[in-house]
Image (cartoon, rainbow, N blue to C red):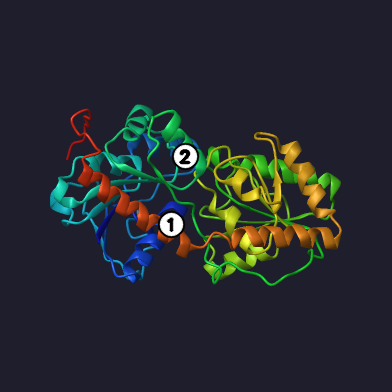
Amino acid sequence: MKITFIIPHADLSGGIRVIAIYAERLKKRGHDVFVVSAPKPRPTLKQQAKSVLKQKGWIPYNNDEPSHFDNSIVPLKVLKRYCPIVDADVPDADVVIATWWETAEWVAKLSKSKGAKVYFIQHYEVFDYLPKQRVEATWSLPMHKIVVAEWLAEIAAKKYKDNNVSYVANGIDTNQFFAIPRGKQTVPTVGLMYAEELWKGCDISLKAFELAKKMVPDLHLVTFGRCSEVETLPLPSGSEHYLQPSQSLLQETYSRCDVWLFGSRFEGFGLPILEAMACRTPVIATPAGAAPELLEQGGGILVKPEDPADMATAIQTICQLSEADWKMMSDRAHGTAIGYTWEDATDRFEAGLHTAIDRQKRGDFSYSKTEITSKR
């Protein structure tokens, strides 16, 4: 197949990482894969003003930031300016894949020669800072959907009456995320991903740690993230924070924890859950993204949303487990994770692309009912 991915811009986000993995794996399977990207959008005047008012200073613009496509075997074309991607930017192909609500608007307007249209959905992006009506409208566009979690498939079916979607859960690279069987840490250690976005729920996890430390006084915290510590989310004294760690340091960080916290309010999948579990670390998670299905085999504890006290109790419970009981939970976490391979995921993703081609041939999609407004 000739396959084109359309991405908003290349960076180090988890969503782009998943796309890069599929692009490379499909390329290695002999498919002709190409990626087209808009450049990183410049901060708006409103965003700059908001940043200055928060005493964060002027937001620098750097379009050469690292991304998961650096040194990739897949060719990447980056447009010179941020604008809708049109036919002239995209090669003819068998399949063209939108990967974000705005790219879905662009892909819907491409001619049929660019390929059967696929909407790869990793989140339900109805956020306050986005145009919600436009985001929701993309779910009704005439494209075959591939979703990464069961809850996204349910939204497609219940809200948008689309029962013909491909559910493809993310995988895990056990050559990258792994750990030998181990026992508890000498100093009880909790880990979490540090992020300032409210929906990531870092504030919930940090509050839970603060409460748990009253019950487990020697509790230690390690974090990593794409941003440095911010004033609105202060880290406890003595914490370790790693800014944009290397993949080897990431694996090491997961592996030195007794428990990993996932406090998201809203999440597409939640790849850190799987990464921590692959490193034999039990996870305490809110019921966001794929957490309910990932933890159902006992590799951690599912807690109430918006409830730091419940999460703190779970931290205490896991940290005070006997060595044998902790190892049992650790083994269950690892057993769950290794069941989610990228090889299997790529099989299902590839099948989803073939489904899109077949549906286009059958004339399943009607373009007459959809109007999209985008300017170049």
Quarter holding residue 101: top left
Q: CA distance from mark 1 to mark 2?
A: 16 Å
Most foreground residue, 275 or 167? 167
Q: Position of residue 347 (x, y in %)?
A: 41, 60
Most foreground residue, 186 or 95? 95
Residue at left offset 29%, top offset 50%: 97
Question: Where's the N terminus, which quadrant?
Answer: bottom left
Q: Position of residue 376 (x, y in %)?
A: 17, 40
Mark found first going from the N terminus, 1 or 2: 1
Give the label on residue 375, or none: none
Residue at left offset 29%, top offset 48%: 356
- What residue is pinned by disc 1? 18
Q: Amino acid at mark 1?
A: Val
Q: Position of residue 72 (x, y in %)?
A: 35, 69
Q: Is residue 191 left or right of residue 10?
A: right
Q: Is residue 58 left or right of residue 3?
A: right
Residue at left offset 21%, top offset 34%: 366
In the image, residue 332 above or below residue 121: below
What is the residue that sits farthest to the front in this orientation?
A: 362
Q: Residues within 10 Å of mark 1 (few under 14, many from 20)?
A: some
Label 2 residue SS: helix
Q: Residues within 10 Å of mark 2 (few under 14, many from 20)?
A: many
Residue at left offset 62%, top offset 39%: 287
- What residue is pinned by disc 2? 152
Tell which tag, 1 or 2, sits nearer the viewer.
2
